[in-house]
Amino acid sequence: MSATYSYTCRFITVLLLTIISIRGSVTHADTIIEADTLRPIKSLHPWPGIVAGAGMLGVAGTARQIYPHAFKVRSSDKGADHLADYLQYVPTLTPWVFKAAGAHTRSDWKRLAVTQAVATAFMAGSVKGLKSAIVDIRPDVSGPDAFPSGHTAWAFMGATMAAYELGDLSPWYTVGAYTLATGIALERIFDRHHYPVDVIAGAGIGILSANVGYLISDLIFGNSQACITGRDLCKESYFSFMSLQTGLSLPLGPIHAGQTSIERLPSLSVSLRSGHRFSDHWGVALEVGLLSTPLVTNVHHDRTFVKSLTSVSAMVAPYYIHTLSSRFRLTAEAAAGYRHNLPLNLDDSSVSTGTSSPVGRIGVGCVLRLSPHFSTHASVGYEMSRYRFTVKPSTAYHIPEGASAHGVSSALLVNISSRYEF
């Protein structure tokens, strides 16, 4: 399972960097840099963020001694999922991707580089120092450095910077960045790497570090920077696209197998999509994706983490686009396909799942164009699929009797994607 994530994420990274490099060369020709013109920098007030981040860290540090664990965990020699190892850097890289695509961010290249360097140094030093000073065993017993969560610190530092740099373009960027950061924090808990107080501390350090970075860079550069303007967008064209999409799937309701309830916790998803327009409003998209769903058994309120169920899906999605202006479009789609579940590979095979299931989905969203060829898409949706679970008696997972369950499940979806249009 970890190998699947590793190879897929490497492929996604290479594809995204290729798109960025192509777009960067186009953007260079499409933009005009007025070297002699300075524009005022948007004023920021980092002190509330510094206070909030420091407060979260303080609360987490105090609570780590008394916080009750939400569920039991088991030590295992199995490899862990590595999706969060890659996704933790996505919010941090997002402002650079948007600048390469021609978006008007708060900071110019020099100011953004200094801000991120200061924030990263402060964040990394804080996380490393606390991990070295505080001995706290991880829930999966893999090491004594649970407090604080470094992945969460990276994610929330990047999300805060994305909100500052892109929030004026659309609030969706702020929502999307913090949604992804929150999903990474949840994954660290559900995959047994950290306790809740560890990720709260990591989030506080990330928010604190980003605000410190902006405070220092604004003191260095003052209140102005070079003005960069781009070509006006055309109202028509470019409904075909390639995109990288990330999101959260929120399963609705538990699954009951005898006396055992199987709870599916919020899931992280990543997918590659390619859409082709065949009329002024209609097109069809092909999607290949990965979904990681943490599973918990619940027997008379005795909750035990099982493992994250990894699924691979392929879907076909006809879509409709309605153009509101040169910058905004509304979208709607209905998708259908199949999802294949990878084996859980538990030590005692006490929980197993069906191998494949048909999937249906509907969704609506909004496209914000940032340049002639680059846009972002935020969407919400509803998904239905079939499930099959089998449980066997197990002392490790406190399952009293064998049983099975099958039926139709549903989930709410929240996604954000970066798109290259052509």
Image: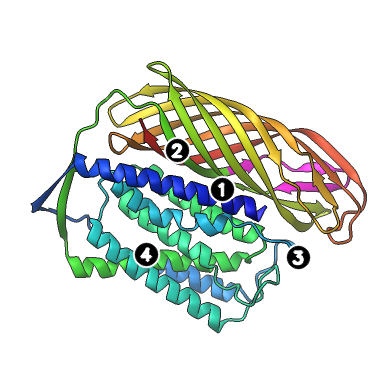
| Disc on the earlier residue, 2 or 1 | 1
Dot 3 falls on a residue whose secondary structure is loop
Mark 1 vs mark 4: in front:
1
Q: Is residue 236 magenta?
A: no
Q: Residue tagged by mark 1? A: 8
Looking at this rendering, what residue extends furthest in the top direction? 279
Q: Which residue position is annotated with label 3?
A: 76
Q: Which mark lies nearer to you, 4 or 2?
A: 2
Helix, strand or loop at disc 1?
helix
- Tell me the SS state at disc 2: strand
Report whether 44 appears left or right of 207. left
Magenta part of the protein: which range?
A: 249-264
Which quadrant, please, contains the C terminus?
Answer: top left
In the displayed structure, 310 sits above or below 220; it is: above
Residue 168 visible from this viewpoint: no
Kind of residue sitting beneath label 1: Thr
> Between disc 4 and disc 2, whose residue precedes?
4
In the picture of the structure, the residue carrying the numbered disc 2 is 243
Classified by dominant secondary structure, the portion drawn in magenta counts as strand
Q: In 3D space, how far apart are the residues under numbered discs 3 and 4 (Cα atoms)?
A: 36 Å
